[in-house]
């Protein structure tokens, strides 16, 4: 939330009072989180009237670096800071480390003071003696390097021997010793070291360069294991979220030791996650990242992941979507520990809602949606907020029994209407809908909201890590508030950046619009970034998971991943798995005049680039006759030096076959359109033309090659981020789907089955589509051979 202007001056004054200069104070105010933390720290320390700058700087460090899992003990630390028992940055860092390990356990003063050097006084004489020792140990190096000596390393050596020494005194003594040993700083001390000698020693330079080029950078721990950032279940006793209320109070969210012990006993200490899609649409590539995070963490830790349908809206859910989700989860390579529905817990959720009312944390409201919106904007309480608990209990029971009309009442959580977080504005917990539920039947006419149900079901299922995308971060306060007031176990919540890809739309609303209005051919249209569409296009789940893993599980939410990065991983996978075949999209007839008509030779063609001659399974047969077809774009009437195709009087090599030379061209009546080419082939293969073309031949005299339909798919939208455009539909790419109805293919493709993928040589990767029939195969282009991402960096 943005800090209000009327409070800015008071906040600025408060920060200046503790010794921050005005510029630092203003920069701090621009950061809402640091502002809230620092304000809370100043009040906890009872220093609203100000303090000296040394203490103020320490308070600022506490506000920005204090371990969130030990907020319970922050007042204790501030007591030591204010009394100057902790007075150096080193002591403060030691305190952070100690408290982070202690977390919410008992605070033991003696151990704390020992760990932080409280009461330890290091005299100037002791520091000076140590500095002299260090200089004596490093004297020769210091004299050689003079003022290019790394003073930071010298100070580090002092800190190792005297961790609680005053760093300012240590710096003064080191500087004085440098001057004593080296004298005045000269101009030569500021010159960069000469590299002339290194340039003359060419062999050494080449050798060094080779070493640098051949040594790969060490991958980080997170690159090796992206799940290393997540804590163990037994660590979920630490505070890592604070909820600030408008009355100045702060809720520090954490489990009690008893609650955590009970949870660990039920789970056996294993990781439990959940993948919780709403069954109201098809999954897209963003869900692939969610699956990788949820299922991946559970798999990596030897735990369990639920597939839980978040089915709180009976009007949106369909059996079609449920079946699709289960199928896609399996296709992506994940195995749910158990399949559950939020509706499985409707009775538990109802009973907890009754308890919430009894505890004074919920009320039945009669405001219309428009009134609720208006009151939220004005931060005003509902007129029914303070109604008696007994009255809300009766009305909620009336809601459950169907005695109140739809839209005439809701159950709202009594949170904080004056909060800076709009997700604490008395969110709706239940609403009335006289609609049967696809899974729960007609038992209920009141249904819980996402904000009410999600966190409770996480707790009921003993989820250890509740992982979601960053747009849910502001809901974290409501999540923990609800579990806290109901005394329920609290999972560890962590948000990561959502996966956005260029040249497409990802919102369910927009996807649903272009599907229902037939801008595309259904939810599995190969142009969509739905997982069904990608699968139909020929993209493998392995390629998608590799793509997602490469992006990482970060919290950076300011970037969109380029489409060519995904295409890079698709090519990498298909290059290893897709056999090569010959297909001509736009056939141009070539008659070989020096080969007998009707004569057919069976030639061997490679399925794989590295096929060994003695491996017959790595080859397939292609017929070669006196009538072959090449791509129309591989012929032109005028030759040029940079052109490697066929032209009058020019030779090319037909891949796996023979060189041919164009001897004549048959033109249409308008004398422009090429109808046919006459050529001679070189059976001896003595000629060595530079150009190599793919081709398909007549399998027998007068018989056309195998005819197939090929669909060439391209990006669906022209702009990288069409969702930002006002008229996003106008950005649809009219050439995103081009159908080639009569391409020619080699006979071996006749037996291809739906889902089989091939590399059409020189053209790209193609997959057999489900529209194929016994009479005609249909191929979808998965991706071209061109790779812009690989060239630009991976």
Image (spheres, rainbow, N blue to C red):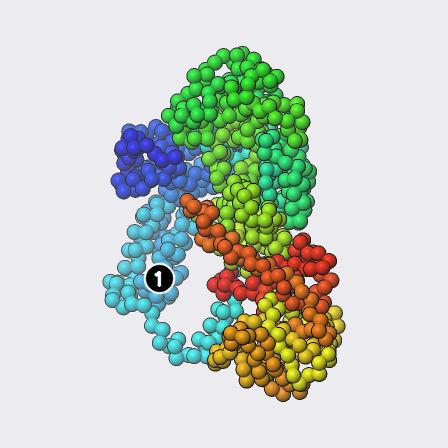
Mark 1 burial class by Cα count in 10 Å: few <14, some 14-19, many 20+: some
**Disc 1, SS:** loop
Left or right relative to 455: residue 241: left
Residue at image x 56%, y 71%?
632
Residue 322 visible to the viewer: yes
Q: Residue furthest front?
A: 669
Q: Which residue is mark 1?
A: 149
- 544 up-or-down from 240: above or below: below
As rendered, which of 699 and 781 lies closer to the eye? 699
Point out residue 474 in the picture as x, y percentages from the top left corner.
46, 35
Residue at image x 48%, y 31%?
477
Residue at image x 43%, y 46%?
727
Point out residue 555 in the picture as x, y percentages from the top left corner.
48, 45
As rendered, which of 167 and 794 lies closer to the eye? 794
- 162 up-or-down from 705: above or below: above
Point out residue 32 in the picture as x, y percentages from the top left corner.
37, 37
Point out residue 411 in the picture as x, y percentages from the top left corner.
52, 21
């Amino acid at each position: 939330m943005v800090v209000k202007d009327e409070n800015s001056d008071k906040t600025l004054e408060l920060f200046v009072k503790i010794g921050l200069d005005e510029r630092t104070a203003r920069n701090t105010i621009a950061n809402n989180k640091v502002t809230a933390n620092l304000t809370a720290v100043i009040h906890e320390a009872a220093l609203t009237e100000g303090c000296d700058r040394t203490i103020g700087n320490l308070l600022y460090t506490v506000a920005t670096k204090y371990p969130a899992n030990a907020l319970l003990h922050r007042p204790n630390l501030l007591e030591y800071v204010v009394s100057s028992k902790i007075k150096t940055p080193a002591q403060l860092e030691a305190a952070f480390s100690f408290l982070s390990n202690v977390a919410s356990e008992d605070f033991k003063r003696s151990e704390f003071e020992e760990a932080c050097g409280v009461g330890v006084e290091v005299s100037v004489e002791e520091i000076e003696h140590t500095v002299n020792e260090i200089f004596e140990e490093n004297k020769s190096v210091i004299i050689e390097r003079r003022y290019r000596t790394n003073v930071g390393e010298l100070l580090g050596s002092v800190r190792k021997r005297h961790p609680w020494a005053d760093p300012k005194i240590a710096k003064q003594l080191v500087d004085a010793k440098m001057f004593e040993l080296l004298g005045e700083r000269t101009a030569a001390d500021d010159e960069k070291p000469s590299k002339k000698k290194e340039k003359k020693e060419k062999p050494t330079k080449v050798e060094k360069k080779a070493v640098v080029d051949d040594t790969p950078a060490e991958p980080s721990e997170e690159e090796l294991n992206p799940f290393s950032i997540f804590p163990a279940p037994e660590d979920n006793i630490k505070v890592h979220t604070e909820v600030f209320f408008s009355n100045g109070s702060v809720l520090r969210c954490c489990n009690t030791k008893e609650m955590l012990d009970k949870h660990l006993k039920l789970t056996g200490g294993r990781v439990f996650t959940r993948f919780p899609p709403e069954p109201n649409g098809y999954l897209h590539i963003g869900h692939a990242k969610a699956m990788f995070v949820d299922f991946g963490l559970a798999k990596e830790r030897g735990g369990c992941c639920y597939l839980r349908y978040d089915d709180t809206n009976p009007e949106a859910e369909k059996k079609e979507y449920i079946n699709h989700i289960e199928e896609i989860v399996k296709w992506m390579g994940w195995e749910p520990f158990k399949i559950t529905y939020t509706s499985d817990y409707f009775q538990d959720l109802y009973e907890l809602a009754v308890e919430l009312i009894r505890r004074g944390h919920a009320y039945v409201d009669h405001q219309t949606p428009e009134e609720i919106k208006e009151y939220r904007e004005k931060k005003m309480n509902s007129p029914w907020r303070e109604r008696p608990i007994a009255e809300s209990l009766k009305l909620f029971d009336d809601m459950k029994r169907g005695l109140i009309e739809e839209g005439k009442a809701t159950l709202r959580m009594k949170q904080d209407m004056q909060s800076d977080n709009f997700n604490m504005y008395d969110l709706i917990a239940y609403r009335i809908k006289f609609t049967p539920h696809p899974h729960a039947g007609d038992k209920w006419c009141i249904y819980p909201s996402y904000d009410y149900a999600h966190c409770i079901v996480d707790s009921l299922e003993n989820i250890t890590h509740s992982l979601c995308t960053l747009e849910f971060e502001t809901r974290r306060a409501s999540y923990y508030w609800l579990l806290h007031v109901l005394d329920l176990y609290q999972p560890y919540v962590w948000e990561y950046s959502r996966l956005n890809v260029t040249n497409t739309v990802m919102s369910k609303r927009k996807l649903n619009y272009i599907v229902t209005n037939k801008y595309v051919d259904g939810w599995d249209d190969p142009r969509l970034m739905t997982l069904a569409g990608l699968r139909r296009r020929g993209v493998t789940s392995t390629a998608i998971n590799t793509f997602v893993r490469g992006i990482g599980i970060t919290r950076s939410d300011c970037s969109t991943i380029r489409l060519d990065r995904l295409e890079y991983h698709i090519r990498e996978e298909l290059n290893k798995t897709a056999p090569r075949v010959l297909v001509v999209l736009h056939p141009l007839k070539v008659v070989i005049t020096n080969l007998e008509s009707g004569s057919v030779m069976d030639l061997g063609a490679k399925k794989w680039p590295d096929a060994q001659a003695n491996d017959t399974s790595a080859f397939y047969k292609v017929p070669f006759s006196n009538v072959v077809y090449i791509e129309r774009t591989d012929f032109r009437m005028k030759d040029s030096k940079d052109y490697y195709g066929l032209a009058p009087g020019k030779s090319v090599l037909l891949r796996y076959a023979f060189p041919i030379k164009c001897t004549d061209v048959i033109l249409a009546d308008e004398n422009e359109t090429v109808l046919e080419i006459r050529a001679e082939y070189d059976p001896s293969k003595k000629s060595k033309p530079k150009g190599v073309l793919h081709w398909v031949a007549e399998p027998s005299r007068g018989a056309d090659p195998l005819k197939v339909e090929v669909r060439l798919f391209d990006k669906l939208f022209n702009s990288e981020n069409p969702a930002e455009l006002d008229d996003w539909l106008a950005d649809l790419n009219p050439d995103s789907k081009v159908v080639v109805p009569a391409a020619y293919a080699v006979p071996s493709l006749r037996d291809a089955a739906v889902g089989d993928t091939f590399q059409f040589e020189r053209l790209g990767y193609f997959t057999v589509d489900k529209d194929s029939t016994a009479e005609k195969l249909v191929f979808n282009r998965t991706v071209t051979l061109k790779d812009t991402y690989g060239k630009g960096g991976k």
